[in-house]
Image (tube, helix red, strand yellow):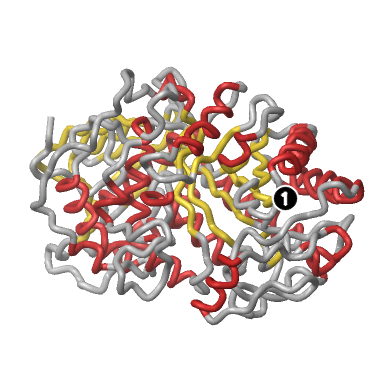
Amino acid sequence: MVLHDAPSLIPFPSSVQLGEGSVPLGSVRLTGDPDTVALLGAELEALLGHEALSDTGATEIALGIDATRGSAEGYALDAGAGRIRIAGHDAAGLFYGTRTLLQLLRRGEPSGGADPEGPAATGWSAPEIRIEDAPRFRYRGVMLDVARHFFAVADVERWIDRATALKYNHLHLHLTDDQGWRIRIDAWPQLTGAGSGSDATGGPGGFYTKDDIREIVAYAAARHMTLVPEIDLPGHTHAIGLGYPDLVELPAITEANIAEAAALDQPLPEHGVPYAAWGVGHSSVKIHEERTYDLIRDVLAEVAELMPGPYLHIGGDECLGTSAADFALFFERAGRLAAATGKTPVAWHEAGAVDGLVPGMIGQYWGSVVPEEGHAAHARRFVERGGALILSPADRAYLDMKPRADHPRGLAWAGIVPLRTAYDWDPAAVLHDVPVTAILGIEAPLWTESVTTLAEADGLAFPRIAAHAEIGWSAQNGAERSWRSFRARVAQLVPAWEASGIAVDRAALDDDPEQDDARVPQPAHPASAPSAEETA
């Protein structure tokens, strides 16, 4: 059933029954699961005021886990008769139920002649509503490129808050690239000692200590988010050569590199010199040097020990100066080294060209939403060898693509990606001969060549990050899975985002809401919309 007055929820739940009344939140008591109570209590206190929360509050918000219910990460929310109850199918589902509750909260006028400044009389309420919900895909990721521009721990944690509010559950940290190496490795201290001191525009750079990483991991875990670390190999490795020049080849500079550098007024890469520019494809580790693999073995082992999640991303993209034979030789070995840490290796889809791909490796597809044949074949290879796919089509999901030509940040090499374009794609329809059960989920990457602050990241990501959140969570044929509904719900959420400190690109809402309101295109193959059980 389509709700003509649909609540402003993103991603939209599986089932919503909206009542006519509301539940007042002037005086609240939280009960149930201690960890979730602590998180939600801090958030409600910031909204309602300290005095509104007490052990004797008139409105109970009961938080519990009912493992007899449906699929992983699902929940039920029932608000009515002066009480709100959230029952998670598991701990993650309970947390996501509280994210839905926070989106439901509305502030009206104080009543009864109360002091309008008094926190207990602010008129906050939730609608009477019944929700049953569970995700479509089990992997719903965002990526933050901290290699080209470094983000401090506090900013990474704020990025986690932004993502988990939209029910993302994976944060891919792009930790290494030509412009900088951002994670301390004890066995190879000059990776950060020399390799972390700059960024894509010649800024100060920086890196994470192991304690920094532990803090980020703990912060994410408390919000049911898994970190996916990426060590990009064998290309995007110029920064390794700052500390260990004997392990990196001289830059393989092409005519395309020269033309791009001239057009952008940027320097070309020089061996052993920090690279403050954006060009790609010119760097490679020494693939036939045995000491290279000593470094990679040590790096992957230390990273895997720090990160408790199941995935370890080893890159594999844009190795333009590496022969196919050398790339295959390297990636077969690097894949085995990654798997030896006990993690499931992940790689960009180019690695699918390798015949000896380690079985079970996950591929991340970043080609266009209408694939080139070679890219599609490379992506299929991961599935053929027992792995799965994460979908990140650059012309839909890359948050750093400009939403319009005059946007002050972002690039446009994959095209201009307005909000509507970001919303109108279906992961199950991209690779037609890949079964939907082989799609682990989706990821929205934010590369940071042109981004130096969290506010600039916000300006590119919001509101398009909400589009991908809905694509990853909501059923493809769901009641409110349409452009018109989505745009209306985004517009309703913008004030709350801005009140929380997010710099929203309001111009993105200029896309015409009355344009063709056709459903998101159906995939060409059957079984397009997996159940949560199929993707679990």
Quarter of the image with the N terminus is top left
Q: Is residue 271 visible?
A: yes
Vertical relation: 335 (above or below) 385: below
Residue 96 in percent (x, y) is at 41, 40
Q: Position of residue 465 (x, y in %)?
A: 37, 54
The residue where tag 1 is placed is 234
Residue 81 visible here: no
Q: Is residue 483 left or right of residue 135?
A: left
Q: Residues within 10 Å of mark 1 (few under 14, many from 20)?
A: many
Report whether 422 appears left or right of 484: right
User: Which sits in the foreground, 48 or 350?
Assistant: 350
- Tell me where residue 490 appears, x and y as whole percent: 24, 55
Residue 44 vs residue 450, the one in the foreground? 450
Quarter of the rendering containing residue 117: bottom left
Considering every residue shown, the one lying at the far front of the view is 255
Q: Is residue 21 left or right of residue 26?
A: left
Q: Nearer the viewer, residue 207 or 147?
A: 147
Q: Residue at x 55, y 34 (%)?
A: 378
Q: How many marks?
A: 1
The residue located at (48%, 50%) in the rendering is: 142
Q: Label 1 amino acid? A: Pro
Residue shown at 29% from the left, 31% from the top: 475
Residue 246: percent from the left, percent from the top?
A: 89, 62
Report which quarter residue 251 is drawn in.
bottom right
Q: Disc 1 on helix, strand or loop?
A: loop
